[in-house]
Image (spheres, rainbow, N blue to C red):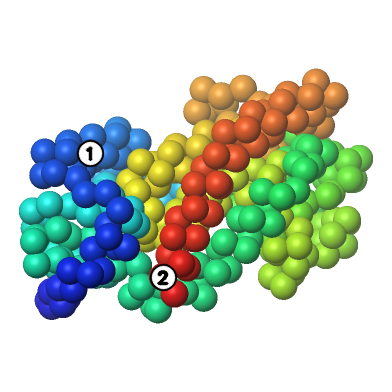
Amino acid sequence: MLACPQAWDNSEMPTLAAAVLSPAAWREQSRAHEERADALTAGRRERAARGERHAIEDFLFEYFGLKPGQIRRWHPGVGVGLQAADAHTCARWYVTSPDGTTALDAATFAADRGEAVVHIRRLLAATAGRKPLLGCFGMHEWAMVYRADSDLRHPLPLRLGQDGTDAAVEANPLVCTHIDAFRFFTAPAVPRNAHQLTRDTQVAMEQPGCLHATMDLYKWAYKLGPAVPGNLLLDCFELARDVRYVDMQASPYDVSSYGLEPIAVETPEGKSEYAARQREFTRRAAPLRERLIEVCDAILARR
């Protein structure tokens, strides 16, 4: 069982908690967070109870790795103190003042996770500073099954069949800028990409028009742990879910079994629709990315 941390010295309180929430205020925020999280994860929890899978939504839990119960756990975020917060008192990285105010100890969090926070901030800031590129048309998913000689990544049929999928890849340039999509390209697709991406080039290549870079805002939010306020985590999760649906609608897979129409990116009309969706996701992602950068800065200021 985790031992309760040492209490703050009174002189540290203004730095650690610029705002303090009353018990009524933080309990209401926590309750609202739990209700919203439950609504967002209801499908996953119900399917798990029945032993069923969802080729689109389950990605958010299996690839990113956060369980519904973890998403449900509310945190006020760095710089916010809670009065009479028994549930947080003994949680990791939280400390309690002599007057009973509990908050995240950003200095301890920075000591433990500082290098990761530096990397996350560098990547987010670099991405935010670039123009969105809207010419990939979601072909990364197609490149993951190009001339596939093994089982497909998802238990769905290919909308155009294998030959039609291969022909679409060969008729369209691959310009993927996201390493965590590129690393799943089939071996024949790798040399077709305009960029030979590596983990070392990630900061230099990430750009805000990329759907996977937008989904990754959710990953960076949960990697920043209790420093991220609950509403920001759920905003990032909800955006990632919306992006994931478009990602699969534009993929080579037939998603009609989920009641979805394809975004046929092998056609001019489909390309136009995909680029429009990219622009909208880029618009929605920008303020979330900035809020995550602010969280990083608040942590690093205590390093």
User: In the current view of this chain or complex, which residue is farthest to the front?
Assistant: 11
Q: Is residue 21 left or right of residue 113?
A: left
| Marks 1 and 2, the one that precedes in the sequence | 1
Secondary structure of the residue carrying tag 1 is: helix
Image coordinates of residue 242 in percent, x first then y, are 52, 34
> In the image shown, does 56 or 7 lie closer to the viewer?
7
Residue 157 in sight: no
Image coordinates of residue 50 in percent, x first then y, are 27, 42
Label 2 CA crowd tier, 10 Å (few <14, some 14–19, many 20+): some
* Vertical side of 274 occupied by 14: above or below: below
Image coordinates of residue 3 in percent, x first then y, are 13, 78
Look at label 1 and name its amino acid: Gln
For disc 1, the marked residue is: 29
Residue 23 in sight: yes
For disc 2, the marked residue is: 302
Residue at the spot x=25%, y=69% of the render? 12
Q: Is residue 231 left or right of residue 162?
A: left
> In the image shown, does 56 or 151 lie closer to the viewer?
56
Look at label 2 and name its amino acid: Arg
Label 1 CA crowd tier, 10 Å (few <14, some 14–19, many 20+): some
Secondary structure of the residue carrying tag 2 is: loop
Q: Is residue 251 left or right of residue 82?
A: right
